[in-house]
Image (spheres, rainbow, N blue to C red):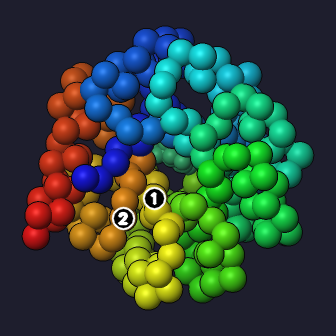
Amino acid sequence: MVQIAPSILAADFARLADEVARVESAGASLLHVDVMDGRFVPNLTIGPPVVKALHAVTDLPLDVHLMVEDADALLPDFIDAGSAILSVHVEACRHLHRTIQTIKAAGVKASVVLNPASPVSLLHDILPEIDMVLLMSVNPGFGGQSFIASTLDKIRLLRETIDARGLDVRIEVDGGVKASNVRQIREAGADILVAGTAVFGCDDYAQAIHALQNEGARQDKA
Ligand code: DX5
Ligand code: ZN
């Protein structure tokens, strides 16, 4: 079944522990944490202390998406804070292979992110080294944007590439995911769907997560 990773960017930050407990009991598989430094993206969010605090109150694996200029400088703190997966942008990492090795050496799952304008071909050499690819389906920086339709072709190409090479790499899709497009995204080959407003923007988180899972599940049976 497709896994849903609610993005806390759309949660009520004043009641974060309660929000996380609610999505955990509602069937979330991971918790997506959007880290923005105000430089790589024009927005500023949270840092390692918040990740550490979340780690103490949830059993959900923390799926930490680093939208920062200098990921290498921040890695130790995010590793210590309890990240289960660390995603770094190909556009921000000059020595990507080294960055990935650092993450893996700490026993954390390593993931590479592609912005909408970055081609799948950039991943050719790093793909066997990583656990996940995070495909941005919006330009990073803000929640609540519309899904960029051309991402579907990218998901298909990446899925074909991973399968043809016999690799064990998950595909996560981030941005504008909602019940009305989740079937297409799943059909294209995504394994994990990030959902901010599609979960936290609803009154009933369980209903929202189930709606996303059920649309994905229809494709699983096909
Ligand atoms: C955007 C973030 C996303 C965002 C998704 O830069 O990486 O994770 O929170 O939000 P929605 O699901 O509302 O598009
Ligand atoms: Zn994200």
Q: Is mark 1 within 8 Å of ligand 2?
A: no
- Indicate which disc residue 190 carries: 2
Q: Secondary structure at mark 1?
A: strand
Give neighbour class at mark 1: few <14, some 14-19, many 20+ (Cα, 10 Å): many
Question: Where, by quadrant of the figure, is residue 91 drawn?
Answer: bottom right
- Spot occupied by residue 21 in the image (x, y as percentages of width and height): 40, 17
Q: Position of residue 218 (x, y in %)?
A: 12, 59
CA separation, marks 1 and 2? 6 Å
Q: Eyeballing the image, is 41 above or below 126? A: above
In the rendered view of the protein, which quadrant contains the C terminus? bottom left
Asked whether 180 or 31 is in front, the reply is 31
Q: Give the answer, above or below, for where 123 lies relative to 96.
A: below
Q: Report how many numbered discs are placed on residues in the image.
A: 2
Up/down of 156 relative to 189, above or below: below
Residues marked 1 and 2 touching at CB (< 8 Å): yes
Look at label 1 and name its amino acid: Glu
Residue type at mark 2 is Ala
Instruction: Tell me, for residue 35, which label it has, or none.
Output: none
Can you give x and y, in whole percent of width and height, for residue 210 in the image? 19, 38
Q: For mark 1, what is the residue? A: 172
Marks 1 and 2, the one that precedes in the sequence: 1
